[in-house]
Image (cartoon, rainbow, N blue to C red):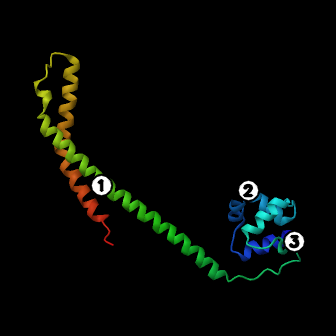
Amino acid sequence: MLQKNIKAIRKSKGLSQEELAIKLNVVRQTISKWEQGLSVPDSDMLIMISEALETPVSTLLGETIIEPKADAIKAISEKLEVINLQLAQRKEAKRKTLHWLCISLCAVLVAVFAALIVLNSPYLGWNYSDPETAVAGAAFHLFEWLLVRLAPIIFTGMIVGIFLTWRKK
């Protein structure tokens, strides 16, 4: 009786074995064993099951419950609605993250350009007879040269990204 009642009530509530297992902090296989009659929950677990299924313990232990035929289409549509909502939330979170990433990259580019303007290419006055200074100066010059050529393209792309991810409420 208990095994059939757990299964019938779980299904009538629209819960899978996995969902019930999560509520009870057990593995799915435990729920399966209870429903197959291979094991029986102890009294504490029986109380937790009744709370999770919002059903009195007496009903769980009582006579066999006739399994109601749930409207399958309604149950599926409700689950799909939840899934769609979760997907929409993920998409919105990704859009916000991308939007702020574009804004941050633009701010970083502006800050680096401002720093380069203030520094006024200090490596030009370095003593290049020292090999370490020469390598550092060449690397700094390469960085500055690439930044000056690539930054406008990156900046333009980020501005476009900001406008594409902009969502007015």
Q: Quadrant of the rendered structure where residue 26 is?
A: bottom right
The quarter of the image holding the N terminus is: bottom right
What amino acid type should be assigned to the residue bearing mark 2? Val
Please state the horizontal and vertical placement of residue 17, each as a whole percent of the image: 72, 65
Mark 1 residue crowding within 10 angstroms, few (<14) / some (14–19) / many (20+): many
Q: Residue furthest top?
A: 129
Question: For the residue labelled by badge 1, is the local secondary structure a helix, a strand or a loop?
Answer: helix
Provide the residue designation for mark 3. Answer: 61
Q: Are marks 2 and 3 in contact (CB under 8 Å)?
A: no
Q: Decide which of tag 1 and tag 2 comes sooner along the chain.
A: 2
Task: Give percent across and percent down for residue 79.
Answer: 60, 73
Residue 44 vs residue 159: left or right? Answer: right
- In the displayed structure, 59 sits above or below 40; it is below
Mark found first going from the N terminus, 3 or 1: 3
State how far apart marks 1 and 2 are (Cα): 43 Å
Query: Looking at the rendered structure, which numbered label has been put on residue 102?
Result: 1
Query: Residue at label 2?
Result: 27
What amino acid type is highlighted by mark number 3?
A: Leu
